[in-house]
Amino acid sequence: MLTRQEALDFLLAACRPLADVEAVDTLQANGRVLAADQVSTLTVPAHDNTQMDGYAVRAADCASGAAVLKVSQRIPAGHVGTALEPGTAARIFTGALIPEGADAVVMQEQCEAAGDSVTVRHAPQAGEWVRRAGEDIMQGSVILTAGTRLRSQELGLAASVGLATLPVLRKLRVAVFFTGDELAMPGEPLAPGAIYNSNRFTLRALLENLGCEIADFGIVPDTLDATRAVLRKAAQDADLIITSGGVSVGEEDHVKPAVEAEGRLDMWQIGIKPGKPLAFGEVRRAASSESGDAFFIGLPGNPVSSFVTFLLLVRPFLLKLQGAAVQAALSFPLRADFDWKGDRRNEFLRVKVNGAGGLDLFGNQGSGVLTSTVWGDGLVDNPAGQPVRAGDIVRFTPFTELLY
């Protein structure tokens, strides 16, 4: 069996990232992948300004800690004051430009105003409560790099230097379908031996979290011809085709021979639990297509196996395919408040952070127990052959690091 890292290295090496670029309104760029470095044409802030409502002063005028100064002007944000004369103060409001001659701001809570004068009951240091020009961004600096998945904070940063549009890679097109005559949709009556198709809902939501455009071909009849037909149709527009289940060698498992007939297929056993079976390959496009073949990934059919395998292997592949920088998910050493015998495979245990800062284990770690993924906060990466004893330090990865 391959290790998880060996399988991931193979997937990432085979990946061909998108290259199609489009310009989108910065307001509409959330979740998109930046196609080129962005350089600021501005210095931010452009001028020294105040962090506080208060009084702009010369620090030397207030050294006594009880200076009485004439208030010579009032400077709201968006207005420019006149040069500050010695022995005077300027009433100033958060974000307003520091007038020439002033070198500090005293917050209003440390001042007493009376008529046209103010008593400053504080001896400020030069620079106090002053935002310096360029302390955030210098003109000509790179503020965002290519491959960045844009979040709220990146969009705010882009807007702060006036970027109304951003160059991004086009959205990844992913086709999904599900095989199995036993599958039914919620709302339909369950025939004897039938199950509801939970993987369809889980997989679609995972893809939506990553900003993919989804073509959902639904439940495909358990025949070779039907499976080949939907593969051909999906490959025409999709960058990637994903299925769950149907890639074993049973008489009713038609995905494997269908992909082999329509392209090529590698099948692996990955040394992880839950998980293990994974299929990867490509499906040919029509001869008239100018694009390369569509990638194919076949996930395990058990719902927790499909979910965990997606998080560990498919998500990094999707990110690289989108043109995003692929970084290992953050994980943290935490105390296990449970005992576990271990397994010959690398296990990913569903756990919850408890009030004492340790980890509790979900009682049933079976690959079909989907409730464990809802109850849990994340996964413990437990090495092959490694038992866990209460009090041991284990490696914990929260779901928030793996879902987006």
Image (cartoon, rainbow, N blue to C red):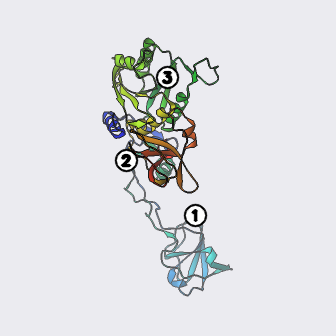
Q: Residue furthest bottom?
A: 64
Question: Who comes first in sequence, dot 1 or dot 3?
Answer: 1
Secondary element at image label 1:
loop
The amino acid type of the residue labelled 1 equals: Ala
**From mark 2 to mark 3, how far is it between C-alphas?**
39 Å
- Amino acid beneath label 2: Asp
Q: Which residue is mark 2?
A: 37
Q: Is residue 186 above or below residue 168?
A: above
Viewer-closest of 236 and 256:
256
Left/right placement of residue 373 relative to residue 342 reads right
Please give the name of the residue rendered at 48% of the width and 15% of the height, measured from the top-left corner: 222
Number of the front mark, 2 or 3 = 3
Q: Nearer the viewer, residue 269 or 24?
A: 269
Checking the image for residue 77, the label placed there is 1
Q: Nearer the viewer, residue 232 or 190?
A: 190
Q: Which of the two discs, 2 and 3, labels the residue nearer the N terminus?
A: 2
Q: Position of residue 45 (x, y in %)?
A: 47, 62
Q: Secondary structure at mark 2?
A: loop
